[in-house]
Image (tube, rainbow, N blue to C red):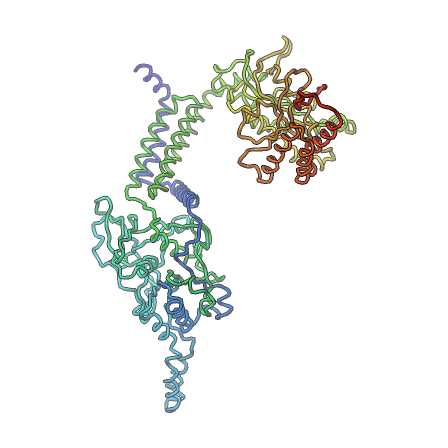
Amino acid sequence: MARWSGVFKKHLTRVVFGGLGVFLLFGHSAKLWDLPFITLLEHHIYDSKLRRFMPETVDQQVVIVDIDEKSLAELGRWPWNRKLLSELVIRLVDDYQVKVLGFDVVFAEPDESSGLGVLEELGRTHFRNDSNYHRVLGELRPQLDFDCLFAASLQGRPVVLGYYFSSLINAEKSGVLPPPVFGPNVFRDRGNHPVVWEGYGANLARFQSVATAAGHFNPLVDPDGSSRRVPMLVEYKGDFYQSLSLAVLRTALGQTRLEIGSTDGTRLVNELTIRWPDGDLKIPVDENLAVAVPYRGGERSFPYVSAADVKNGRIPKDQLAGRIVLIGASAPGLNDLRVTPVGAAYPGVEVHANLIAGMLSGTVKLRPEYAAGFDSVQVFLVGGMLTLLLPLLSPVRAALATGAALLLVLGFNLASWQIGQVILPVAAVIVLILLLFAYNMSWGYFVESRAKRQFADLFGQYVPSALVEEMAKDPERYSMEGRNGNLTVLFADIRGFTSLSEGMKPQELARMMNVYLDAMTQVIQSRLGTLDKYIGDAVMAFWGAPVPDPLHPCNAIQAALEMQHALRGLAPTFAAQGWPALQIGIGINTGTMTVGDMGSTIRKAYTVLGDPVNLASRLEGITKNYGVGIVVGEATCKAAGMFVYRELDRVRVKGKEGAVTIFEPLGVESELPKDQARELRLWKEGLRLYRAQDWDQAELQLYNLLKLSPDCALYQLYIRRIAEMRKVALPADWDGVTVFETK
């Protein structure tokens, strides 16, 4: 107990400041105060989850009749007269037999485009005594009263109108609201906080009185301007009105009854139930009686058809029959665009479509009333645990603990989202975890930096600077004394360097080599390699010491691939400087070798020795024989199974009795192109035929491979070998091994 008391006393200051961070984030989660950047981050995380898991398929249940540029060109500029709209309604409902038709449009003003008002005014003035004029006008009036025609088209048909509410104090009130779905006092003492509006812009009374239903199309806009939720019920002067999507859905289901309820036994309403003849449809709502829009993809996640094509009967009936149809606009200047998690200019009509489709399929996620309480608990528990634990851990273990906490929090949050269909906050606890980790690491860095500098001064002459910091975190683990270990070594050499350098000035050669070696060194160190030495134009590096690396074969091969890529990236720079283009050969081998601080009393170096090192050097030297950039030994190939290899040959190099199989790494298996994988299968078969001394079939296979890769030196090499083999009598025990007599 005394020991732990001393430990905590030593880190008391760190714990106190960490606790202040927990208190700050806890207050935000408990809604005691607001941290805007946490709220903004929460929105971004929500959007990321939504985009990651949305199906991104086209839902055929809802079709959008689009007032597009084509429609404006054929039917005239917007707004269209009500006679044309009435014909469109009749066409959709009577001819195409849609299930329900919803308008994402408000009809707030009378239509005077027919000129009927002017004719009636003339009848009251210039032609007030002309009986023929009044008789003809009476005959024409039914055809010219476009509003009457439109109202008649709505009568008895499943048409839902849209309207909007306004939050401005003393906002105008135009048109007539539909009957409310709930009257006053329904939500009194229920604990909900419905959205309350001050004014509205609704449809003319003659339209509203004959429409089947109507609904508002007001989303809830978050502080960042994005529309993520839509209230299913809103309050105006004590009464409650339904959204356009809810009104359309209820109309589509037929004779329905809307009920409110709670799933957790409390008084808070968190569920709406649509009762209809075929069953119940439940819709989860939050404390604002709103739902999170279940966006299924980007723009046009629903079928679009041109209004002109519908009006003129050019759409096949089966594309619309029995569907829920919404009328919206995409033509420039008309389209109702909103900022959403899936697009900065998203059609408003598709917001309603997503809601309808989501409610039908049951994919609306619940934002529970206990979300704030859950967030407070997770901030307190996770933050308190890390505040006490991180000061006691080494940097590596602190990173592991932090990573584990992040994985646990994110895993639970994602599982709640995807499996439980529940939206839970997570931004505050993520920020707290990262903040505590950064704070503790910064504290440790500044307090321990002096000791680390001393360690770097002591060992920096032996160990590459990229690894000094890692070693300084736990210096007791490392020793420069010689030892045997399973390591991977790499040699890289410029091909034809002598001839390339002969025509260059010393200063230019030095500049070129500095650029080249700098690029190669950066790649090696980025892949955790220890840079052993530069040998003229050659580079020697190894993996697995002094810092242990269980993936040392994989990292060495990845470094080799990236070195070749980096060299290609230098080509434009070299060309601009007038330097020659470079090609390098790389040899890699894995095995048990001696590693340690070796040399004389005058000069030492941290290096590796042993037979596997010599073989790696030989492999680098024979890359040019096979026309490849990288050759690895059999041990490396077996240890780094994540890569795809092309077997090159079985060879016996100078200074080694046994034969070894050599390979060329082509890349990570999951990233290998299909055509290259097919070519690799053909090569394996060709190599088998070669070793079986089936020269004709092997040669045919190689020529077929040359058609796929005409410049492949490897295929050309084996074709030449076959030609030579045909000239000599091979011994009965010929094993296909190639012998190299030179280094």
Of residue 694 and residue 188, the one placed in the foreground of this image is: 694
Instruction: Determine which quarter of the picture holds residue 483.
Output: top right
Q: Is residue 178 left or right of residue 538?
A: left
Seen in the picture, residue 198 relative to 86 is either above or below; the reply is above
Q: Is residue 245 visible?
A: yes
Which image quarter is the N terminus in? top left
Task: Find residue 74 and report its horizontal and vertical position in percent.
Answer: 50, 70
Of residue 318 and residue 718, the one placed in the foreground of this image is: 718
Q: Is residue 738 left or right of residue 643?
A: right
Q: Is residue 490 left or right of residue 328?
A: right
Q: Which residue sits at x=34%, y=31%?
A: 382
Of residue 158 and residue 451, the one placed in the foreground of this image is: 158
Q: Is residue 168 visible?
A: no
Task: Find residue 387 and report its horizontal and vertical position in percent.
Answer: 36, 27
Task: Find residue 290 and report its horizontal and vertical position in percent.
Answer: 32, 51
Q: Which residue sits at x=43%, y=45%?
A: 51
Number of dots carrying numbers? 0
Instruction: Determine which quarter of the picture holds residue 390.
Output: top left
Residue lying farthest to the right in this orientation: 503
Task: Find residue 173 and report its horizontal and vertical position in percent.
Answer: 32, 65
Q: Which residue sits at x=34%, y=19%?
A: 9
Which image quarter is the C terminus in? top right
Instruction: Determine which quarter of the picture holds residue 588.
Output: top right
